[in-house]
Image (cartoon, rainbow, N blue to C red):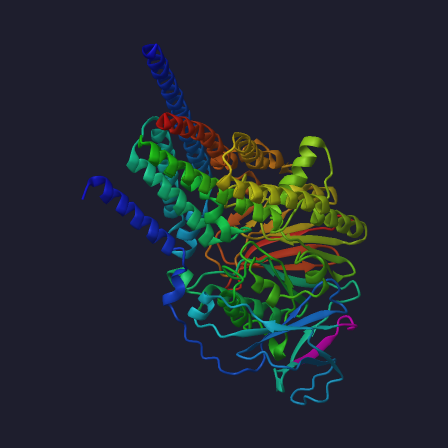
């Protein structure tokens, strides 16, 4: 065979191999899932704009969609008495969770989503509830609504819980030990501290939002059930690994999902003095969202003691290229608004690291500037920071460590603690209010 | 008399052969330059972090520093091969670069994590097939040149159609290119609603052009595609400044291939005429 033909055949073989390797390598790893029951699972509470009087309750059923799905709830515990609950609402959304070939190949069971809304709740009240699917009830859980008074409150915030099992990591969607450890820590924190109201996720739940990833995220999230079956409401954001349709299916946010074209950006009024703005870096940052953001900041800043934003892609990355398009677009579109309206804190994810920047204004250190924390550590493998970057020089810092942030909104100060999987405090930051 | 006619005919054949050779040389030069620009662009993209490092570190558990070293090494390979290919026609080197461009597209698609990454291999068709065109252009025969023309049209067409579909589907980055570029270049506040309509028109035109190119051999169409390829690639710069230049360079095929096709088409037409005579 002539030399040229041999070379061309070889290259053709490499091409063919490359194309075939496009297929995910998980197909040979079938995970046995011992899940036969059709009872409700993955029960969760989601908060959107007015958590003092409104919540979304979502759950999953496996194998069968069922026909009748409802939520029963009350302000007192009814334990095993399913018929004594004072209130009930039917689920608003039910449907089959999209399954791809890879989901089947990995053996995750067919899933069905169910979402319901409970409205007209009273502030600072424990709400006990069960979900029912075709006569099968969940356990009784409870959550606490947000206050209508100016009391001290706290939230947990963290991002990036994809990957992190055994090597090769990609194959190890379960057991995801890092994520499970962080969930255990979140549970411990909520049990220790009743003023923690919610768990805010900075996105990238799994490598994709397809069912083989979200199924295991939801399974692991069942660790975060506190004493007496307390649930910590979730405040959801969307990241660059959450594009798939499974995200909308599993994290339905009522009108926010419907009217803002799956925008997933919204303002949560955690208390009369605490506003949390969730932004979405995966849609247009310079269009409607920017207009909306400016309006929210202008409305909230003059009369809210604490104004915090969180979003996935960082404006000030400490690992990835500072000049990369994905970060610069955030810096150009939103940071001028953060600075114009003097927000108190910006929480970022994506880099897989722990960081706190110097206060920044106009692209340089400034005592009056904005501090950016986070970059994501809910079990994801941690990277190494580029420690030469000006915005993490002391008193800023960066460190490779799994973490979740406890953010306390006090009347006289904002206190942020980064906490590791063992409960150790990795960072502490405090600031006084910008306005009286 | 007969001798005079024959001599004139001979002269015209020689003249045409000379012109067609010039066109071929120009087509080759443009394609080489396109590939060089692509390689420089990818070099800088890899140096600043890419899907490769992400997959090696995140999924295969490689030490981050080692993953970065591999990424830097591949960046250097791109740069070296791009430079060598500009001056020399090494078939093996060209095929390596084809493979590397395809490899990068597959990696990006596999890693996901950006809008429309499912379409990456199609969106990168032009940059993958540009070096393949050069690989075949080294062969001097007429029929191969026709194949090259088809390969380059295929790459260009698929890339235009894919980007067109992304635009029609309102790719969020494209929306921001429009909104911010209007603001930066013209001082015009373009609201998202209007940006979306403009983007859908642009996308539809791209799809039409991407289809037309398979059936119509027209210099003006190709010139428009070269111009539009340059404008859309440069939108990263008009949005976020000159620091985005690697993004433009890595898309050199979007404007380099249409220019190559103009000269290649002229060359093929003249050669066809010569053959008829």
The quarter in which the N terminus of chain A is drawn is top left
At which x and y percent is residue A259? Answer: 72, 59
* Residue B13 in view (yes/no): yes
Q: Is residue B215 left or right of residue A291?
A: left
At which x and y percent is residue A117? Answer: 71, 72
Residues shaded magenta:
A119-130
At which x and y percent is residue B156? Answer: 48, 40
Number of marks in the image? 0
In the image, residue A251 above or below residue A69? above
Residue A341 picture quarter: top right
At which x and y percent is residue B192? Answer: 71, 46
Give the camera-side residue of A250 and A332: A250
View extreme (front): residue: B1
Give the camera-side residue of A327 and A247: A247
Residue at (67% x, 42% y) in the render: B198
Give the camera-side residue of B35 and A256: B35
Residue B231 magenta = no
Give the camera-side residue of B81 and A436: B81
Residue at (70% x, 57% y) in the render: A260
Q: Is residue B95 left or right of residue A53?
A: left
In the image, residue B172 above or below residue B79? below
* Residue B69 in view (yes/no): no
Residue at (66% x, 82% y) in the render: A68
Residue A121 magenta = yes
């Amino acid at each position: 065979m002539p030399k040229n033909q041999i070379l061309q055949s070889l290259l053709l073989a490499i091409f063919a191999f490359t194309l075939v390797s496009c297929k995910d390598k998980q197909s040979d790893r079938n995970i046995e899932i011992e899940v036969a029951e059709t009872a409700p699972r993955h029960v969760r509470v989601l908060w959107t704009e007015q958590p003092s009087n409104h919540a979304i309750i979502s759950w999953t059923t496996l194998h069968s969609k069922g026909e009748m799905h409802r939520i029963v709830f009350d302000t007192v515990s009814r334990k095993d008495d399913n018929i004594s609950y004072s209130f009930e609402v039917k689920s608003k959304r039910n449907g089959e969770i999209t399954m791809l070939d890879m989901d089947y190949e990995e053996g995750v069971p067919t899933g069905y989503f169910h979402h319901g809304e409970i409205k007209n709740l009273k502030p600072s009240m424990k709400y006990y509830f069960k979900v029912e699917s075709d006569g099968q009830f969940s356990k009784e859980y409870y959550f606490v609504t947000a206050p209508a008074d100016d009391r001290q409150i706290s939230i947990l915030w963290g991002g990036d819980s994809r990957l992190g099992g055994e090597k090769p990591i990609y194959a190890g969607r379960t057991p995801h030990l890092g994520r499970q450890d962080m969930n255990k820590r979140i549970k411990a924190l909520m049990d220790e501290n009743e003023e923690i109201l919610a768990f805010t996720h900075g996105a990238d739940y799994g490598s994709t939002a397809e069912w083989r990833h979200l199924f295991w995220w939801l399974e692991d999230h069942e660790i975060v059930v506190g004493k007496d079956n307390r649930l910590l409401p979730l405040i959801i954001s969307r990241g660059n690994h959450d594009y798939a349709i499974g995200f909308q299916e599993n994290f339905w946010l009522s009108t926010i999902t419907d009217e803002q074209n799956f925008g997933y950006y919204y303002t949560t009024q955690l208390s009369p003095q605490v506003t949390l703005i969730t932004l979405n870096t995966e849609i247009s940052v310079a269009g409607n969202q920017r207009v909306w953001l400016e309006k929210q900041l202008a409305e909230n800043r003059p009369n809210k003691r604490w104004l915090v934003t969180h979003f996935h892609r960082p404006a000030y990355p400490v690992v990835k290229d500072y000049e990369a398009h994905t970060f610069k677009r955030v810096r150009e579109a939103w940071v001028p608004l953060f600075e114009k309206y003097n927000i108190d804190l910006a929480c970022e994810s994506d880099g897989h690291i722990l960081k706190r920047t110097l206060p920044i204004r106009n692209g340089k250190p400034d005592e009056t500037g904005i501090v950016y924390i986070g970059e994501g550590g809910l079990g994801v493998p941690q990277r190494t920071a580029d420690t030469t970057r000006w915005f993490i020089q002391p008193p800023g810092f960066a460190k490779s460590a799994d973490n979740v942030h406890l953010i306390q909104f006090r009347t006289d100060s904002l206190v942020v603690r980064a906490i590791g999987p063992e409960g150790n405090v990795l960072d502490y930051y405090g600031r006084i209010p910008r306005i009286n | 008399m007969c001798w005079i006619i024959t001599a004139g005919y001979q002269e015209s054949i020689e003249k045409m052969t000379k012109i067609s050779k010039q066109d071929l040389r120009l087509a080759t030069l443009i394609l080489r330059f396109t590939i060089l620009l692509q390689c420089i662009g990818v070099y800088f993209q890899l140096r600043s972090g890419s899907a490769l490092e992400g997959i090696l570190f995140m999924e295969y558990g490689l030490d981050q520093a080692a993953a970065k070293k591999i990424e830097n090494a591949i960046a250097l390979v791109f740069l070296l091969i791009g430079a060598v290919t500009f001056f020399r026609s090494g078939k093996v080197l060209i095929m390596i670069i084809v493979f590397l461009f395809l490899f990068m597209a597959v990696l990006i698609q596999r890693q996901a994590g950006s809008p429309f990454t499912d379409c990456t291999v199609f969106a990168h068709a032009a940059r993958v097939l540009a070096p393949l065109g050069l690989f075949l252009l080294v062969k001097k025969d007429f029929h191969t040149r026709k194949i090259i023309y088809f390969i380059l049209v295929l790459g260009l067409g698929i890339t235009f159609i894919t980007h067109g579909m992304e635009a029609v589907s309102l790719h969020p980055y494209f929306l921001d290119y429009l909104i911010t570029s209007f603001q930066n270049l013209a001082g015009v506040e373009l609201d998202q609603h209007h940006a979306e309509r403009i983007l859908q028109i642009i996308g539809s035109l791209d799809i039409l052009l991407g289809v037309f190119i398979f059936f119509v051999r027209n210099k003006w169409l190709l010139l428009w595609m070269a111009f539009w390829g340059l404008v859309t690639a440069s939108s990263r710069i008009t949005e976020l400044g000159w620091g985005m230049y690697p993004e433009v360079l890595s898309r050199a095929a979007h404007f380099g291939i249409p220019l190559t096709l103009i000269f290649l088409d002229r060359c093929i037409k003249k050669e066809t005429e010569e053959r008829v005579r």
